[in-house]
Image: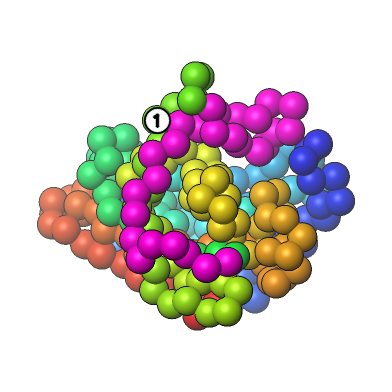
Amino acid sequence: MAANPDFIYRPPMTPYLDIVYQDDDIVVLNKGSGLLTVPGRLPEHQDCLQNRVARVLPTATIVHRLDMATSGLLLMALNKDAHVDISRQFEKRQTQKSYRARVYGKLEYLQGEINLPLICDWPNRPKQKVDHEHGKSSKTLYKLLQQDDDSALVELIPITGRSHQLRVHMLALGHPILGDRLYAHEKALTQSERLQLHALSLTISHPRTKQSISFKAPCPFT
């Protein structure tokens, strides 16, 4: 990884697996910051949420992902019908997701909308960048929850689901997320040992009952 040459993978071991909800069709987990969602290419990158879940729920399949450094809610399907149904919900943007982040600096507005197209920054992958000519449309809503001297707690709602979307959008706004090894400048990086981004809540239509069902995982840095 050209963008992060000093990276050494040290996945959190406690809790090894944090199951928030489970039934015959889905399992919802609270992923720790620093744990890969799926295995990487290298042998030392095989420990991940997917493989940990597979040991106890062999039929579980990944429907969506979280960045390794991001903590919070991740849902997996436990059978093919559930996988197809929930994948379609994510694809059609019928799910609702809310994140918490602590960002650098003082926000100018109490809330807003970020519409900036994103594309992979290929020479510096896995980094993404704003590209008005070739980027894919990307939209994030933000709301200020708490303003401190040199950082702010914000609610982030991704309308689209691009890679690193919340991280790059807040950077483009001039407020990188604290502890972001890929995007934060030195002052924002040194304020936290971890990326202060957490998937707080998730609402889906249950694949079997078709009823709306919501999940929440407490934010570890507020």
Query: To which residue does mark 1 refer?
Result: 137
One can see residue 200 in this view: no
Position of 122 relative to 42 (above/below): above
Asked if residue 213 lies in the magenta stretch, the reply is no
Q: What colouring method underlies this structural image?
A: rainbow
Q: Where on the picture, by quarter, is residue 109? A: bottom left
Position of residue 37 measured from the top left corner of the image (x, y, whole percent): 57, 51
Q: Is residue 145 left or right of residue 206?
A: right
Position of 173 relative to 214 (above/below): above
Q: Is residue 189 left or right of residue 153?
A: right
Residue at image x 39%, y 74%?
145
One can see residue 180 in this view: yes
Q: Where on the picture, by quarter, is residue 34? A: bottom right
Graded by Cα atoms within 10 Å as few (under 14), some (14 to 19) or many (20 or more), the crowding at tag 1 reads some
Residue at image x 44%, y 57%?
74
Position of residue 150 measured from the top left corner of the image (x, y, whole percent): 60, 74
Asked if residue 126 lies in the magenta stretch, the reply is yes
Pick whichever, 86 or 195, lies toward us: 195
Q: Which amino acid type is marked by label 1?
A: Ser
Q: Secondary structure at mark 1?
A: loop
Position of residue 10 measured from the top left corner of the image (x, y, whole percent): 77, 62
Residue at image x 74%, y 48%?
45
Q: Is residue 67 left or right of residue 166?
A: right
Position of 74 relative to 161 (above/below): below
Query: Among all residues in the image, which is located at the extreme front?
Result: 108
Q: Which residues are magenta?
A: 105-131
Pick whichever, 218 or 38, lies toward us: 218
